[in-house]
Image (tube, rainbow, N blue to C red):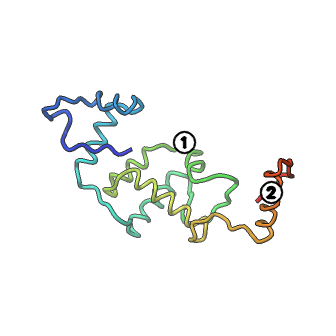
């Protein structure tokens, strides 16, 4: 969620308080989070645009250090897990994303998204698609879907 204010609500003549802003967002966000998000957006000093190779390396090395040697750039066995499952195994939280955001002078969410993109590209050999179905698998999938459409309980297959 992006919060953008033309001016500081606390200092403005409108008298809007951070708590009021938080309540308008459904109460799921604390007033402190609203204030901090406003400060980061209003600073206008955060870099935007493509990440450099050096910034990517900082992200990779930080995650390697925090996640017991896990390398974002190496293809890892999936076992039905994604990057968030892996970093969650080491009691990982937003602390590192915040630290990296400050270090790189980037928005925290953009750093997190970039880390996921680096990992995804490694898992997909640069294609961004985790797996392509073979012609035989496509035919099996068509048969399976056709059986479902006809109301038949088809044999469960792995695609």
Disc 1 target residue: 91
Q: Position of residue 26 (x, y in %)?
A: 40, 30
Q: Quadrant of residue 4?
A: top left
Q: Front-most of 52 and 17? A: 17
In the rendered image of this protein, does residue 31 appear above or below residue 121? above
Position above or below: 87 against 28: below
Q: Residue 79, how many percent across, how many down?
A: 70, 54
Residue 31: assigned label: none
In front here: 22 or 126?
A: 22
The correct choice, above or below, for 22 with respect to 7 in the image is above
Q: CA distance from mark 2 to mark 1?
A: 44 Å
- The structure residue drawn at horizontal position 78% and vertical position 62%, both measured from the top left corner, is 142
Marks 2 and 1, the one that precedes in the sequence: 1
Q: Which residue is mark 2?
A: 146
What residue is at 15 percent from the left and 34 percent from the top?
11
Quarter occupied by residue 6: top left
Q: Name the mark nearer the viewer: 2 or 1.
A: 2
Circles 2 and 1 in contact, beta carbons < 8 Å: no
Q: Quadrant of residue 39?
A: top left
Assign the N terminus to one quadrant of the image: top left
Residue 35 vs 44, above or below: the answer is above
Q: Tag 2's secondary structure? A: helix
Q: Which of 92/120 is in front?
A: 120
Classify mark 1: helix, strand or loop: loop
**125 left or right of 35 in image:** right
Is 37 left, or right, of 128 in this rendering?
left
């Amino acid at each position: 969620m992006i919060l953008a204010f033309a001016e500081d609500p606390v200092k403005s003549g409108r008298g809007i308080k951070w708590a009021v802003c938080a309540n308008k967002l459904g109460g799921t966000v604390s007033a402190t989070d609203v204030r901090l998000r406003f400060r980061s957006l209003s600073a206008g000093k955060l870099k935007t645009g493509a990440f450099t190779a050096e910034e990517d390396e900082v992200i990779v090395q930080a995650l390697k250090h925090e996640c017991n040697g896990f390398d974002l750039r190496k293809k890892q066995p999936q076992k039905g897990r994604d990057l968030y499952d892996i970093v969650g195994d080491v009691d990982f939280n937003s602390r590192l994303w915040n630290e990296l955001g400050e270090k790189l002078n980037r928005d925290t969410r953009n750093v997190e998204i970039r880390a996921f993109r680096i990992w995804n590209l490694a898992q997909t050999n640069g294609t961004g698609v985790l797996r392509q179905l073979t012609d035989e698998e496509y035919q099996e999938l068509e048969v399976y879907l056709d059986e479902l459409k006809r109301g038949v309980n088809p044999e469960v297959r792995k695609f």
